[in-house]
Amino acid sequence: MLAASRLEVPSEQLVRYRRHLHAHPELSLEEFETANFIERELRDAGLGDLRTGIAKTGILATLKGGKPGPVTLLRADMDALPMDEASDVPYRSKRDGAMHACGHDGHVAILLSSARALARVRDEIPGTVVFCFQPAEEGPAGNKMMIEEGALENPHVDRCFALHLYSGLEVGKIGVRDGPFFASSDRFRVLLKGKGGHGAMPHTSVDPIVAASQLVTLFQTIASREIAPKDSVVVTVGKLQSGTTFNVIPDHAEMLGTVRAFDESIRLSVPKRMERMVAGICSALRMEYEFEYLWGYPPTVNDVKMNDVVREVGAQMLGAQNVADPYDLNFWAEDMSYMMEQRPGAYFVVGVRGPQLGHEPQHSARYDIDERALEVGFKMMTGLALHG
């Protein structure tokens, strides 16, 4: 096997790609210019086995190696967030209402540069590499859409890997963890139906705001009193809307929120617990309700054997001292979880925190990275591809 450390790191290309993509962000399922850019660069590198338009804008590039080995899928997500950038840098977003505030521009730069480098040494690759450029990670589950359109077949993928740039970790390091790493992400909606009236005569009304206030507190007992302390779950009410003015009791109150969990059995139990509480409060306070629970991304669970591959490559490429293991659990959610439900896979984070840049958290309007992290990502992705 060709040692990945012998591949020249294309530092200038990595930065150029990332800054171009950062300046031209596109929202979920609108990544047409991004996809065209990726396709041009792949074809220029001699990667002609392409499937385009997967899940609308996704691209799959297949590179057959010259040695026997597994089919390895490497994934990068392409979409930006619907927000305006606040940083004043030369490569700031040129599009109002769109910004790469989560590092996906870096993910694409890393995978695109890795594909170009690996194409030059294809005879040394054990097995086959599928480069997956995925749309719509930020909500619409582009990963699931790509699976439904055949991303894991032709060729049949044996294993999969993905990375995420992360401002919580120092540049030069990666973070690895066996088992659950990122949480599930589900949504709920509760509509409480009371009876409006004058704020000075509450006895003639059925106040949905009182019920909503009690439910916000009651939902917190799911974590504190119904789930074992060794386990984790988050129930967050992110929106509570009701009423129009100071002295009117409204007819309705609406609550929206999110639930996060690492364990699938706990995840599945939460909506029943929540609706039991909603029904109980409404029965006690004489009102009706609507309860909706929308299933989102499942937990991202790392396969131990695939994580061992990441550890081995990390130790070889970066030095064992730069592999943070086990790294902290993170209540983010990630749609790579869908592929990792169907194939053994590993997901790891790459630190972007440097002396000057990389301190703003993901989804901040001032998010930026220490671009040396791109070199770390390149080393990891090429190393994983060349690991038989």
Image (cartoon, grey):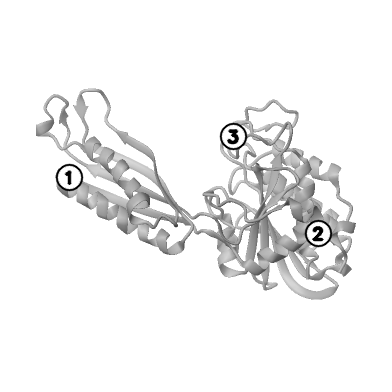
Residue 84 sits in quarter: top right
- Gap between marks 1 and 3, in whole Å? 40 Å
Three-letter residue code for mark 3: Ser
Quadrant containing the C terminus is: bottom right
**Which residue carries the number 2 mark?**
316
Residue 97 sits in quarter: top right
Residue 361's x, y, as percent?
60, 37
Q: Is residue 222 left or right of residue 287?
A: right
Three-letter residue code for mark 2: Gln
Looking at the picture, tell me which residue is in the foreground, 122 or 58: 122
Element assignment for label 1: loop
**Which residue carries the number 1 mark?**
287
Residue sitting at 49 percent across and 55 percent down?
184
Q: Nearer the viewer, mark 2 or mark 3?
A: 2
Element assignment for label 3: loop
Looking at the picture, tell me which residue is in the foreground, 340 or 156: 340
Placement of 23 over or under 262, stated as above or below: above
- Gap between marks 2 and 3, in whole Å? 33 Å
> Which of the two labelled residues, at mark 1 and mark 3, occupies the earlier sequence position?
1
Instruction: Answer few, some or many: residues within 10 Å of disc 3's Cα (few below 14, many 20 plus, some between 14 and 19).
Output: some
Residue 364's label in the rendered image is 3
